[in-house]
Image (spheres, coloured by chain):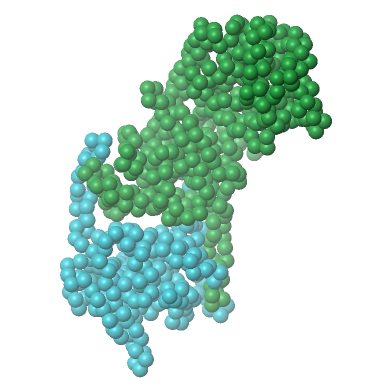
Amino acid sequence: MTGLESHVTVQKRAYYSPPWADVSIIGVAGSSGSGKSTLAQAIVKKLNLPWVDSFYKTLTPEQSKLAFANEYDFDSPDAIDFDILVERLRDLKAGKRADIPVYSFAKHQRMEHTTSIYSPHVLVLEGIFALYDPRVLELLDMGIYCEADGDTCLSRRIVRDVRERGRDIEGVIKQWFGFVKPNFEKFVEPQRKVADLIVPRGIENRVALDMMVQFIEKKLFEKSRHHREALSQLEIACKESPLSDRVVVLDETPQLKFMNTILQDIDTCPEDFIFYFDRLASLIIEQALNNVQFKEATIVTPQGHTYSGLAPKGEVCAVLVLRGGSAFEPALRKTIPDCRTGRILIQSDFSTGEPELHYLRLPDNIQNQESVLLIDTQMASGGAALMAVQVLVDHGVPQERIVLATYSAGKIGLHRLTSVFPEITAVVCNMLDTPDERWVERRYFRC
Amino acid sequence: MTDKTTSQAPPKQSVGPEYRAQNQKPSATVSVDVALENVHVLPQTPQLIALLSMIRSKTTDRADFIFYSNRIIRLLVEEGLNHLPVIEHTVTTPVGRTYNGLMFQGKICGVSIMRAGEAMEQGLRDCCRSVRIGKILIQRDEETSQPKLFYDKLPEDIADRWVLLLDPMFATGGSATMAVEVLKSRGVPEDHILFLNLIASPEGVRAFSAKFPRLRVVTSFIDQGLDEKKNGRDGQVLIHFEKD
């Protein structure tokens, strides 16, 4: 019965697939020193993608001793934690956030902290065994194999390990003949057969680099187009249904309209603008807080009388959508002085209008917070808000705990957002039929 | 004591946003509904009830008391200002749209009934930056036990202003009644006075509103318990306000 009901709800819900749910993964393999890292880095740099290091296993104490003596075989597939790699790649492919282990080559161990990666449109997986595991191969959109002359490889490796990884030359040479070379023939070279593209001469091969970048750019453009198309399709779909009752618009009292008049007047001086925005923002936050959960609390007064009151059920944290949302910070501090505050930077691409996630810092254990206020000044088509809510949901925040608070919002954008996420609450000061371009933050921060 | 509380039967109801089902909303004691045209009670939202709970609890320390009462006071001031007269005012927005807005007509000033009323001045300043604030000191005469005006300092042009009269606690209303009479004697029309108050007693507010039918009262909570005796159940709120 319950299962059936929830199934029906799922059916009704409009579906939004964030761009990162469709990541393209490109594998770059090749022998050590073949120039694959440089090539991968060149691609990443050209396309401004995130960079992730490696999936070496954490060594046991004995293995660690061997490693420091340059006797541990890093160049065997056994040194790679393919299980974690596959798991993380699958997470990323499914649009989830992935915590990537950080490996210290100087200490020969995995560091305690991890790097979270999120939202790349394209992920470059680089490593001598990038094309080795069939489970990984299955997830790749493109496999590249870098080839280089053996002497070149060895000399490159010496330079790199001595300079960047703090080894001595003897150790490097010992490793080369002990492990690298035999392993190359045994494990690395066979990957040549499964690659889509074989790049000789590594980084010097400009033609190959340009071709790859072009291929990836084409992929990115297609993805962006799909994302934008999906956004506008959602828009059409939700015009037909009524707006969610979880959209709370502030009552248009004379006071509210008066403050709006001052804020919207182009001739208002900056001092007044900031004062009245802070004042109005406080009211928006107060209203947003009416939508978080409370619990009953019996209050004992100093006289010993009791009063059945209420208390917040748990902690409320906030996430500001930069940069607009940070205009709410003074008002937020006035209402909840010790509010844990995360930040998300989402910017719309100048030419396509597609929202892109650039920066993310959320409170620890955000999924356990009683409520999360998601704050932005203006919401036009709702693309950024949609992405921001998706980020929170990906971090395990249940929809019904999210309260979006904003100064103004386009009606269609709100409609779209609440069709995709029907359990979130939105608190809006001004609902507009035709949304404005973003001007509030410009006025508030004066630049 | 218990008998009194039960016989009063304070109104208890579930509070929360409309979209939530009744059984998903916690219930709490809410303001008594006095149904008087010139008495405006703030919407009994869960957040307001939680703020009132904070200021009523004996475990709340003074810093928290001040912080939470200020938050309620700001809401009171925002609501009070809604009762001022307005005129239409059209402006051009930064994106070149026309906005049909409004402006306030007339000048305002605050008048606090010392000492408790002074605690509300910060909240008023938070909303109206450079507002003039007058003072009235009324104390109970030891011999007659009637309220007596000891001191006042009011803006000279107060007769031309809308007055926000500030006093957080309103039990019998003796001081507030006298303060209104002082204002009227200085030429302030009764309908230009807005009385802003945190917690009031139903009997007090009924008598006050009958005596001054054109004055408007804006309060956050009307509480049965406040009638019990002078200072009543919420005496501690007064104590907090009157301590320095």
Quarter of the N terminus of chain A within the rendering: top right
- Taking the spot 49% from the left edge, 69% from the top edge, the residue there is B62
Furthest residue to the right? A62
The x, y position of residue A127, in whole percent, is 66, 18
| Residue B71 in view, yes or no | yes
Between residue B216 and residue A29, name the one nearer to us. A29
Between residue A226 and residue A60, name the one nearer to us. A60
- Taking the spot 56% from the left edge, 76% from the top edge, the residue there is A304
**Which chain is depicted green?**
A
Between residue A247 and residue A196, name the one nearer to us. A196
- Taking the spot 82% from the left edge, 30% from the top edge, the residue there is A62
Quarter of the C terminus of chain A within the rendering: top left
Seen in the picture, residue A4 relative to B78 is either above or below; the reply is: above
Q: Quadrant of residue A177?
A: top right
The x, y position of residue A25, in whole percent, is 59, 18
Seen in the picture, residue A72 relative to B230 is either above or below; the reply is: above
The x, y position of residue A434, in whole percent, is 31, 34
Seen in the picture, residue A387 relative to A46 is either above or below; the reply is: below
Q: Quadrant of residue A32?
A: top right
**Which chain is depicted cyan?**
B
User: Along the horizontal axis of the image, is A233 left or right of A196?
Assistant: left
The x, y position of residue B80, in whole percent, is 31, 62
| Residue A419 in view, yes or no | no
- Taking the spot 44% from the left edge, 19% from the top edge, the residue there is A225
Total numbered badges shown on the rendered structure: 0
